[in-house]
């Protein structure tokens, strides 16, 4: 039973890592987009 | 950056903090995953009836406790930094000329935490921010 809980925790951590990568890309992209557009105004 | 575009504030500094904390949190997630794999191995040994010393099990518990605390701390810090960054970038589309901006900065942050709403609204907010921040979007005349 606890092994199953461990595997579930591992799956959750994998999802969290995917979310971190997604957030990283999003933060970089939007920040660059806004600053580029501001410079172009 | 000395030009006058009323209301625009660069999200650069907040982005640097958020990205740094995302790095630290990502590393913590990897450490937590390794720790979980080690624990699963230990539990498998116990299940198979192998001899496992008490020091090994208490060591595992101590490691898991430390990793969990680290995970919690980095997670909360990252969420706080992300919220500050989100607040800043959701204020900018209007000064950058977006005409159909319909989310207040406060709601752009809160929607990530409201049950049910968090399934759809954050995506809409980010999509609108991207749309309003793109180069070809019309700027203020």
Image (cartoon, rainbow, N blue to C red):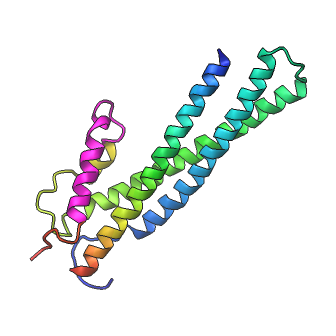
Q: Is residue B52 visible?
A: yes
Image check: A30 left or right of B62?
left
Q: Residue at x 64, y 26 (%)?
A: A6
Asked whether B91 or B43 is in front, the reply is B43
Relative vertical location of residue B90 with respect to residue A15 in this rendering, above or below: below
Number of dots carrying numbers = 0
Of all residues, the one furthest to the front in this rendering is: B48
Q: Where A2 sits versus A14, above or below?
A: above
> x and y percent of residue B132 in the render?
20, 62
Determine whether A21 is above or below B16 in the image. above
Task: Give the residues drawn in magenta, as a range.
Answer: B111-133
Which residue does the image show at 16% across and 52% down from the upper left? Answer: B102
Query: Which image quadrant for residue B31?
Result: top right
Measuring from the top left, give residue B67's x and y in whole percent. 69, 40
Q: x and y percent of residue B37 in the render?
A: 69, 34
**Residue B93 appears anywhere in the view:** no
Q: Is residue B108 left or right of residue B32?
A: left
Q: Residue furthest left?
A: B141
Q: Residue at x 78, y 26 (%)?
A: B42
Q: Residue at x 80, y 18 (%)?
A: B46
Q: Is residue B94 magenta?
A: no
Provide residue B21's location: percent of width, then percent of height.
54, 56
């Amino acid at each position: 039973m606890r092994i199953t809980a461990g595997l579930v925790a591992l799956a959750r951590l994998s999802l969290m890592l995917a979310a971190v990568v997604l957030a990283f890309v999003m933060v970089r992209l939007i920040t660059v987009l806004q600053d580029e557009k501001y410079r172009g105004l | 950056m000395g030009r006058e575009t009323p209301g625009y504030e660069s999200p650069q500094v907040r982005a640097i903090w958020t990205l740094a904390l995302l790095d630290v949190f990502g590393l913590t997630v990897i450490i937590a995953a390794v720790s979980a794999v080690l624990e699963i191995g230990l539990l498998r040994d116990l299940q198979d009836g192998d001899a496992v010393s008490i020091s090994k099990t208490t060591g595992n518990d101590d490691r898991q406790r430390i990793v969990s605390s680290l995970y919690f701390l980095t997670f909360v810090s990252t969420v706080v930094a992300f919220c500050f960054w989100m607040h800043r970038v959701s204020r900018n589309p209007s000064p950058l000329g977006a005409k159909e901006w319909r989310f207040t900065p406060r709601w752009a942050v809160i929607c990530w935490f409201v049950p049910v709403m968090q399934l759809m609204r954050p995506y809409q907010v980010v999509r609108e921010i991207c749309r309003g921040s793109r180069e070809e979007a019309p700027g203020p005349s």
